[in-house]
Image: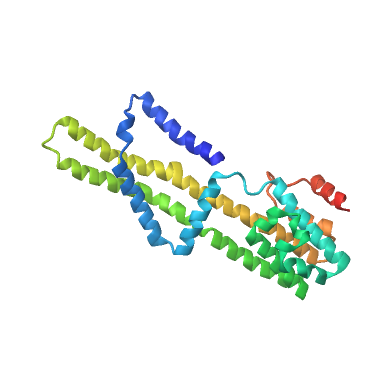
Amino acid sequence: MIAIVGIVIVFGSILAGYLLEHGNVWVLLQPAELIIIGGAALGSLIITCPPSVLLDIVKKIPSVFKGASYNKTAYLELLNLLYDIFVKIRKEGVLHIEGDIEAPEKSELFKKYPNVISNHHALKFLCDNLRVYIVGVRSSDLEDMMDVELETHHNESAVAPSIVTKMADSLPGFGIVAAVLGVVITMGKMNESPEVIGESVAAALVGTFLGILLCYGLVGPIGSHLEHKANEDSKYIEVIKSSILAFAKDIPPQMAVEFGRRVLFSDSKPSFKELEERVRKKK
C-alpha cells in the first residue's frame, strides 16, 4: 500500500510543479509517445525473458502494492510451528513427524499455522530438510545441503527484479527514440505555421520526459521493491535453516528456535520475551 502512496507523491509533485509554472497539462497527454515507449519496452522484455521468468514477473508485480509480506506476527507463527515440531520429535520420536511433513496441508500440527502453509516454497524447504533429518545425516552435511538450496533460491528469486531493473534502464533510451521520431515528423512540417511546429516539437520532447520519468519514478523503484521482497523471502527461509540446524545439534527446542529468531532484521524481529511467552503458554 505504501508503494501507491509513493507513486502518487512522484507524479503529483511533478504535475503540481508543472502547473505552478503555468504549464499546459494537455500537452503532456501524448498517447503515441506512450505507445512507442511502452510497446518497445514490453517487446524488449519478451525478447529478454523465457516464458517462466515473464510469468514470475507478472505474479510478483501485484505484491509491490500489497502490505509487508513478513512482519513480527508472521515470524512468531513460523517460530511457534518450528517449536511444536521439535517438541513432538523430542516427546514422540523422530518418526512420528513423518506423517505431518508428508502432507502438511492435512496435518493438525501445521493447520494451526495457515500463513506458513500458504508460503509454498518455505513449506517445501521445511519439509524436505526435516525428511533429511529423519533419514539421519551429520549436522555439517545438513548445513551444506541447506546452504546449496538457499543459494539456488537466492539466485532464482533475483532474476525477476534484475530484469525489471534492466527494463527501467532502457526506458530513457526508448524515450529518445520517441523524441527522434517526433523530430522527424516535425521536419516534415517546416512549411507549417510556427504554432504547428511548436506543438510538434513539444510532443517530441514529451517522449524524452516520459522515458526518464517512467525509469526513475516508476519501473526502477518497482524493480528495487521486488529485490527487497526477494531478500525478505530468503530471510524467512534462513529462520527455518538456523532453527533446524540448531535442533540437529541436540540443542533444546526453545533454544533452537532462538537461533532462528536471531537471524531476523530488527524491524520485524520478535523480542526474546515475546517468543518466550508464546513458548511458556504451550508448556
Q: Name the quarter where the N terminus is drawn.
A: top right
Percent position of residue 192, x then y: 13, 35
Q: Nearer the viewer, residue 57 or 145?
A: 57
Whether residue 229 is situated above or below residue 133 in the rendered picture: above
Percent position of residue 198, x then y: 21, 33
In the image, farthest residue toward the left: 191
In the image, farthest residue toward the front: 106
x 66%, y 64%: residue: 124
One can see residue 256 in this view: no
Q: Is residue 112 left or right of residue 154?
A: right
Q: Is residue 127 left or right of residue 26?
A: right
Q: Quadrant of residue 139?
A: bottom right
Q: Nearer the viewer, residue 74 or 170?
A: 74
Q: Nearer the viewer, residue 105 or 270?
A: 105
How many marks the image carries: the answer is 0
Q: Quadrant of residue 120?
A: bottom right
Percent position of residue 173, x then y: 33, 49
Percent position of residue 269, x then y: 72, 47
x 27%, y 44%: residue: 179
Q: Nearer the viewer, residue 135 or 105?
A: 105
Colour scheme shown: rainbow
Q: Is residue 74 left or right of residue 277?
A: left
Whether residue 28 is situated above or below residue 271 in the rendered picture: above
x 48%, y 59%: residue: 55
Q: Is residue 107 left or right of residue 118?
A: right
x 70%, y 54%: residue: 114
One can see residue 3 in this view: yes
